[in-house]
Image (spheres, grey):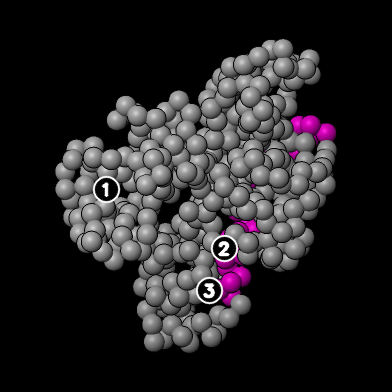
């Protein structure tokens, strides 16, 4: 699973990425701070399986705090997009191509309205952030349409020997677009049964928009809620874009909390609506005031910073992935004594055999059966797994 972080310059996109990953992303107040995409690991928060067995886990990847397991997920932060990106403005074609492999997009916008359409700083509240939601849709749709139109004649000739859905799927095969998504997009665009040679420009545009929505769903991270002009805008955005998930965010606050927790100044579980100061004597006056502001203006008012909510929504709600733990009925430890050391994100409808292959190809090659460790029930390779299952894979010796 790959989550793409997108948005125009100066909206806090790189701050969001750094808060989610604690990676050293360059953060500055000018366009195109990010040129090459930043790649890192974020984490999806779920209940840890340790609760079911009365043990304490030792993750090899990710971490666990008070029974909350944080499962690794890949993130990519591409450079800021500006209007006209699909036509190459601001190196837009390069930045869009960086998103090819993304499964879901988190679109970070400046909810305070303090950056214009090109990412330049303006007076707070003077710019309507709704424009950014519309512009990113336009850029992505035009990009997808452009990919079809580039070689349309050659593509149509190819479709004479191949069904339209198969030909379209072949064209988008490198974009993580499934055949099922192609079929649904054709239906959504009302192009079922229409030969490609009969498509008009409007048909290409409608299909491109439909397939983009299917293959690159978008979550809106309404950032900078720490600024006073943001609240009214967030409320308006939720009304105007009711078909989107709009999440109120303060990436800067999340980054501050994670850094403070990393330095043992506070206890904070990402996604929580509160934190605990561990030692007031270690805090400077400036740090104390900053934490008070975050508690009162962000956590109390918005029930969290929104960053973890975006990551969880991307993986669990939009992509409907599940988390599955490897384990044994008689032994939850690995060879090194680590308890429940691994947890894997899997696509929906994954089977026991899929899980075996995820762990290691040898497990799939020598697969015999699997055991649901919670129920101690033996299951076959086609058994569909559930979220938070603990599964033992049995193999030929």
State whether the magenta stretch is mostly helix, strand or loop. helix
Identify the residue at image location x=70%, y=26%.
Answer: 226
Q: Nearer the viewer, residue 77 or 184?
A: 77
Few, some or many residues within 10 Å of mark 1 (<14, 14–19, 20+): many
Query: What is the C-alpha distance between the residues marked 1 and 3?
Result: 54 Å
Query: What is the C-alpha distance between the residues marked 1 and 2?
Result: 35 Å
**Is residue 131 depicted above or below 210 in this figure?**
above
Disc assigned to residue 392: 1
Mark nearer the viewer, 1 or 2 = 1
Identify the residue at image location x=55%, y=84%.
Answer: 153
**Dot 2 corresponds to which residue?**
100
Identify the residue at image location x=77%, y=41%.
Answer: 115
Who comes first in sequence, dot 1 or dot 3?
Answer: 3
**Dot 3 corresponds to which residue?**
200
Identify the residue at image location x=31%, y=60%.
Answer: 363
**Is residue 357 depicted above or below 109 in this figure?**
below
Query: What is the C-alpha distance between the residues marked 3 and 2?
Result: 25 Å
Q: Describe the element under mark 1 as helix, strand or loop.
A: strand
Who comes first in sequence, dot 3 or dot 2?
Answer: 2
Who comes first in sequence, dot 1 or dot 2?
Answer: 2
- In the picture, the quarter occupied by the C terminus is bottom left
Magenta residue check for 132: yes
Q: Nearer the viewer, residue 330 or 261?
A: 330
**Is residue 332 depicted above or below 301 in this figure?**
below
**Where is residue 211 shown, x and y percent of the image?**
48, 61
Mark nearer the viewer, 3 or 2 = 2
Q: Describe the element under mark 2 as helix, strand or loop.
A: loop
Q: Nearer the viewer, residue 380 or 5?
A: 380
Please say if the residues under marks 1 and 3 sit with CB atoms less than 8 Å apart: no
Mark nearer the viewer, 1 or 3 = 1
Q: Nearer the viewer, residue 14 or 169?
A: 14
């Amino acid at each position: 699973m790959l989550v793409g972080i997108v948005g125009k310059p100066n909206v806090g996109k790189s701050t969001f990425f750094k808060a989610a990953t604690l990676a050293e992303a360059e953060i500055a107040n000018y366009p195109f701070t990010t040129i090459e995409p930043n790649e890192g690991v974020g984490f999806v928060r779920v209940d840890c399986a340790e609760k079911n067995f009365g043990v304490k886990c030792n993750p090899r990847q990710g971490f666990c705090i008070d029974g909350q397991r944080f499962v690794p997920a890949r993130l990519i932060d591409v450079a800021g997009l500006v209007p006209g990106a699909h036509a190459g403005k601001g190196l837009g074609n390069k930045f869009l191509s960086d998103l090819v492999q993304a499964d879901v997009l988190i679109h970070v916008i400046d909810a305070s309205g303090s950056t214009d359409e090109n990412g330049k700083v303006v007076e707070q509240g003077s710019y309507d952030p709704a424009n950014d939601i519309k512009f990113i849709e336009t850029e992505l749709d035009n990009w997808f349409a452009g990919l079809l139109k580039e070689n349309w004649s050659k593509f149509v000739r190819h479709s004479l020997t191949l069904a339209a859905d198969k030909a379209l799927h072949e064209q988008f095969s490198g974009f993580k677009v499934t055949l099922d998504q192609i079929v649904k997009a054709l239906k959504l665009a009302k192009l079922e049964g229409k030969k490609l040679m009969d498509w008009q420009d409007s048909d290409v545009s409608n299909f491109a928009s439909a397939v983009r929505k299917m293959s690159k769903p978008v979550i809106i991270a309404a950032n900078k809620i720490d600024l006073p002009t943001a609240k009214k805008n967030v409320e308006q955005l939720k009304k105007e874009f009711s078909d989107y998930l709009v999440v109120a965010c303060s990436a800067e606050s999340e980054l501050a909390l994670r850094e403070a927790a990393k330095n043992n100044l506070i206890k904070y579980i990402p996604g929580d609506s509160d934190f605990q100061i561990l030692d007031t004597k270690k805090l400077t006056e400036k740090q104390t005031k900053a934490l008070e502001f975050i508690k009162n203006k962000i956590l109390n008012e918005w029930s969290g910073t929104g960053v973890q909510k975006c990551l969880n929504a991307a993986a669990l709600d939009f992509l409907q992935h599940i988390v599955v733990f490897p384990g044994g009925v008689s032994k939850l430890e690995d060879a090194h004594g680590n308890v429940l050391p691994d947890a894997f994100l899997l696509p929906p409808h994954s089977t026991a055999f899929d899980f075996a292959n995820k762990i290691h190809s040898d497990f799939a090659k020598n697969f015999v059966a699997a055991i649901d460790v919670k129920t101690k029930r033996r299951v076959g390779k086609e058994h569909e797994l559930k979220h938070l299952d603990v599964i033992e894979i049995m193999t030929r010796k």
